[in-house]
Image (cartoon, grey):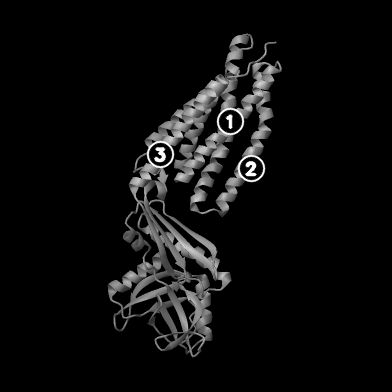
Amino acid sequence: MLKYRISSIILIVSAVVILIFIQKTENQESRFSFKFGLDLEGGSHLVYEALTSNLPDGEISGAMSSLREVIERRVNIFGVSEPIVQVERGGVIGGESNRLIVELPGVTDLKEAIRMIGRTPLLEFKLVLEDSNATSSDGFIFEDTGLTGRLLEKSTLGFDNVTGTPLVLLSFNGEGRKLFSEITQKNTGRILAIFLDGEVLSTPVIREEIRDGNAQISGNFKAEEARQLVRDLNFGALPVPIELISTQTIGPSLGEKILDEGVKAGIFGLILVVVFLVLWYRLPGLVASLALVIYGLIMLALFKLIPVTLTAAGIAGFILSMGMAVDANVLIFERMKEELRSGKLLREAINVGFKRAWFSIRDSNITGLLSAVILFWFGTSLIKGFALILGLGILVSMFSALTLTRTFLLSIPSLEKESRILRFLFSSGVSRISEK
């Protein structure tokens, strides 16, 4: 019993430390402050359509992943708190839709949000052909080579040695160097046009094979224009063009209202659960309520440490996981009551009750975890937030029910000789333990 009492004291002290950590880190300067999603903090929601009709089916998935990474890097440059950039793919009439969803918490100016995404340049290299099946522009006929900004490693500013005019110097990554070498080797003497956002910047002639993966753009730039292009290319040249198709703004006042109502609902629900547990299960209910409070503190600390971006759906998942934690305690207490009715002593009834309840708790939590994993794997950002917090809550709730509650119960002094006290403290609101 002594070791359980010591463990209980350690758990309570740890809970106080966690509470202090939560309070002390809740300020804007702390890197452990709560991170809120678009629906709670307010901000901008933008949906872009990726124009992938010219890409082979096998390359679309990789191009969309690269597009997401490029936009994410570009948004991060502007210091937006917890931006969410994700790809959604679905069927539409006549083909498939590839969309990019961008959420910018704290940015409520749509023009500013669109500017942050910006017209990130689409860089393309195309060979000049006399082929009526190819696309036509500026009197030339062009053929795609597959060499685009997706394969760009870096861009730098340079100057022509003779004229002193600004140049944009390009260096491709490993895949790009190999492709660039093949193109220049097989097409010596032909024009390799350089496109930026669909416009021809220059039409240099391939003089020889270029193996080092370096190229240059000379477009009669001013120094500032060339510098801006270099910056944009380094921040992310788009592997595929995108088109803005919808926007939505959530004001900070609406987000604050949603957050306040969610917090109130959580507190109100917790109070009702505690009242029910204490009235129905008495001393075990009080112990479960203490474990439930510690469970809540652990979850809040994990939200800060991981960190987890909290959304309204995520808060709903948190509240739901609290209910599952209570459910585990109910199973344990009912098994304990059965053991006490059969004549077992308190400590033995507690141990056997936990063992008998474990299988039901295990099965229910495994199915809950599987549901959370499936929702997270296939869901959108809104569903993923709910699934992540639900899954995390289920794991912590198992620890709460099987470790915290058990430790606190086993630290209670033996009351076997006080049958009336025992009957009152460990019976429910309607049932009674028969006296042996």
Q: Is residue 141 left or right of residue 119?
A: right
Compared to 63, does 211 lie above or below? below
- Marks 2 and 1 sit apart, C-alpha to C-alpha, by 17 Å
Q: Which mark is residue 401?
A: 1
Q: Earlier in the sequence, mark 2 or mark 1?
A: 2
Q: Earlier in the sequence, mark 1 or mark 3?
A: 3
Q: Is residue 336 left or right of residue 20?
A: right
- Marks 3 and 2 sit apart, C-alpha to C-alpha, by 30 Å
Between 94 and 361, the one lying in front of the other is 94
Position of residue 326 measured from the top left corner of the image (x, y, whole percent): 56, 31
User: Dividing the picture into quarters, in which one does residue 166 lie?
Assistant: bottom left
Q: Which mark is residue 367?
A: 2
Position of residue 10 measured from the top left corner of the image (x, y, whole percent): 51, 26
Q: Earlier in the sequence, mark 3 or mark 2?
A: 3
Q: Is residue 290 left or right of residue 423?
A: left
The kind of residue on which mark 1 rests is Ala
* Residue picked out by circle 3: 261
